[in-house]
Each structure stands twice: as structure tokens, then as C-alpha cells.
């Protein structure tokens, strides 16, 4: 099992690459969720301005 994680002496590089990729994917999802909220708020404000009561 330790040979699998060591990957012929390149384990650190390989696992760090996986870790950095996973981190960036998580950050991307969070950024998309935040931007979606911002866009929805802007659309709601624009809609409210276009249909005054």
C-alpha cells in the first residue's frame, strides 16, 4: 500500500497535483455560486425598477 502512495518516488508531486486540482475545483464552484447570487440580485433589482408599483 505504501508503494501505491509513494508512486515510485513521485508520490509527493502526484498527490500535490491532485490536491491543488481539487482545491481549484472547489474554489471554482464557490465562485460560481457567489456570482449566481450577485446576478440574481441584480436581475431582481432591474425587474423591480422596470415595474414600479
Image (cartoon, grey):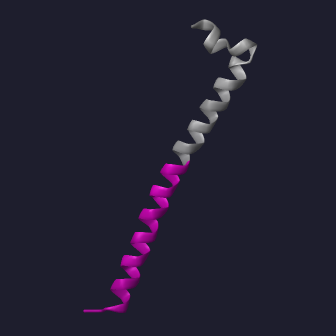
Q: Residue furthest left?
A: 53
Image vertical order of residue 27 relative to residue 10, above or below: below
User: How far across and down, in percent of the image, does residue 48 sit?
Assistant: 33, 84
Image quarter where the C terminus lies is bottom left
User: How far across and down, in percent of the image, does residue 21 sit?
Assistant: 62, 38
Q: Is residue 33 left or right of residue 52?
A: right
Q: Tell which of 20 and 10 is nearer to you.
A: 10
Tell me the residue at 45%/70% (across/down): 39
Tell me the residue at 59%/43% (across/down): 24
Q: Which corner quadrant of the image does residue 41 belong to? A: bottom left
Instruction: Tell me which segment is drawn in magenta.
Output: 28-53
User: How far across and down, in percent of the image, does residue 50 sit?
Assistant: 37, 91
Q: Is residue 39 left or right of residue 17?
A: left
Tell me the residue at 60%/7% (across/down): 2
User: How far across and down, in percent of the image, does residue 38 sit?
Assistant: 45, 66
Image quarter where the N terminus lies is top right
Amino acid at each position: 500500500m505504501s508503494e501505491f502512495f509513494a508512486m515510485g518516488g513521485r508520490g509527493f508531486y502526484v498527490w500535490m497535483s491532485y490536491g491543488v486540482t481539487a482545491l481549484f475545483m472547489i474554489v471554482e464552484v464557490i465562485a460560481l455560486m457567489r456570482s449566481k447570487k450577485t446576478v440574481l440580485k441584480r436581475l431582481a433589482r432591474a425587474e423591480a425598477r422596470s415595474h414600479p408599483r
